[in-house]
Image (tube, rainbow, N blue to C red):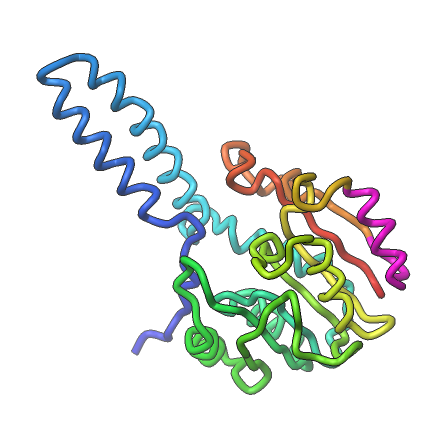
Amino acid sequence: MAEAKVDYGNWVSKKLIYFPGLLAVAFLALSFFSYYFLIVALPFLIITAYFSYANYRFSPAGGDIQAKVREFVLDRLEWDGKGVALDIGCGNGALAIELAKRYPGAEITGIDSWEGNWDYSQASCEKNAAIEGVADRTKFQKASAAELPFDDGTFDAAISNFVFHEVKDARNKRDVVKEALRVVKKGGHFAFQDLFPVKGLYGNIDEMLEEIKGWGVDDVRYVNTSNADFIPKPLKLPFMVGSIGIIYGRK
């Protein structure tokens, strides 16, 4: 019997391929009546081709870029793997599970609201953790990143991947960062990836780093993920992974 393998899905929904693709086919069919519809069909063909390419590159067959983006977060977490860690906005458990696999002595908690358009749930996280063999060291619970249900300094480490900007119950996204750091122990480590280069969400990055230091954080640094060599140029557009970065360090 073949060993079960987790499919963590694809960040590019097939709807983004099928919908413009169907419109392109419809307008191409109408072009038999008027060449004008060829012009109308062209942008839909381009959109279909682009999202098909993105879907492929994010998939394991196309280089698994989304897994490499997750690994880029974990590589910034300068933690010895001893103790307990928190994944904020765990989705289907991919990052939390990878953290548990990377640190066999650690216990990982994942939280998420499991709302919105993503087909994720607590049950899917627990199922994936069981398949990956880390169910005994991972647990998942429903919670908001804006108000974490943990005492100050509960965790030795905290991570998050591409989540903070989606937290609806926090108007100021810096508050989400502050809340995430609240539950990290003094001397603990963190690595958070989000749309930090987007000034409309976080303001000036250097000013934000100074503010974070004012919260009692000893060391905080920033790296622009979009500059990573493993990300192909076509995926560096702002609406894909062209506007993401990581803040990381030690509290």
Q: Residue furthest left?
A: 33
Task: State the image coordinates of residue 103 (x, y, percent, origin top left).
Answer: 67, 74
- Report the magenta residues as a range: 205-220
Task: State the image coordinates of residue 237 (x, y, percent, origin top left).
Answer: 54, 34
Closer to the camera, 236 or 43?
A: 43
What quarter of the picture does the N terminus occupy?
bottom left
The residue at 76%/62% (across/down) is 178
Task: State the image coordinates of residue 108 (x, y, percent, origin top left).
Answer: 63, 77
Membership of 240 in magenta stretch: no
Closer to the camera, 146 or 193?
A: 146
Occupied quadrant, residue 230: top right
In this rendering, position of residue 169 left or right of residue 223 = left
The residue at 87%/49% (across/down) is 210
Q: In the displayed structure, would residue 127 be above or below residue 165?
A: below
In this rendering, position of residue 157 left or right of residue 98 = right
Q: Residue furthest bottom?
A: 136
What quarter of the picture does the C terminus occupy?
bottom right
The residue at 82%/49% (across/down) is 209
Q: In the displayed structure, would residue 195 be above or below residue 175?
A: above
Q: In the displayed structure, would residue 46 be above or below residue 225?
A: above
Counting the numbered discs, the total is 0
Q: In the displayed structure, would residue 117 be above or below residue 108?
A: above
Membership of 207 in magenta stretch: yes
Task: State the image coordinates of residue 119 (x, y, percent, origin top left).
Answer: 39, 63
The residue at 74%/42% (across/down) is 203
In this rendering, position of residue 131 left or right of residue 201 = left
Closer to the camera, 235 or 147?
A: 147
